[in-house]
Amino acid sequence: MYHCFSLSLRDVELILAARGVVVSYETIREWSLRFGRTYAKTLKRRRPQPGDKWFLDGVSRTHF
């Protein structure tokens, strides 16, 4: 989440705590230093590139 959104390490700590994962922001910082660059590169590669084509399937709607 830290690499996807503008969140502080303490924000990430609170979000994880709300989901039952208890870690300190220092631990998150260590993870970020160790794995963050690789994770950020993976996210960057997944972004749509100029010239990418998107196709939408037809959606049938029922009106009530």
Image: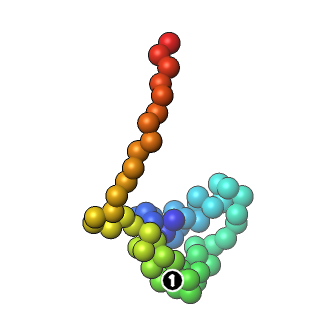
Query: Could you tell me residue 39's position as x and y percent?
Result: 51, 77
**Is any atom of residue 30 visible in this view?**
yes
Q: Can you name the residue that lies furthest to the top here? A: 64
**Is any atom of residue 40 visible in this view?**
no
Side of 34 relative to 52 (left or right) = right
Depicted 62 relative to depicted 6: above or below: above
Side of 54 relative to 22 (left or right) = left
Residue tagged 1: 38
Side of 27 relative to 56 (left or right) = right
Rendered image quadrant of residue 31: bottom right
What residue lies at 32% left-to-right and 67% top-to-bottom? 49
What residue lies at 63% left-to-right and 73% top-to-bottom? 24
Q: Using a 10 Å C-alpha cutoff, classify the residue at mark 1 as few (fewer than 14 neighbours), some (14 to 19) or many (20 or more).
A: few
Q: Can you name the residue that lies furthest to the left here? A: 50
What residue lies at 59% left-to-right and 65% top-to-bottom? 13
Front residue of 43/14: it is 43
Rendered image quadrant of residue 4: bottom left
**Could you tell me how many numbered marks the image carries?**
1
Query: Could you tell me residue 14's position as x and y percent?
Result: 59, 60
Query: Could you tell me residue 21's position as x and y percent?
Result: 70, 63
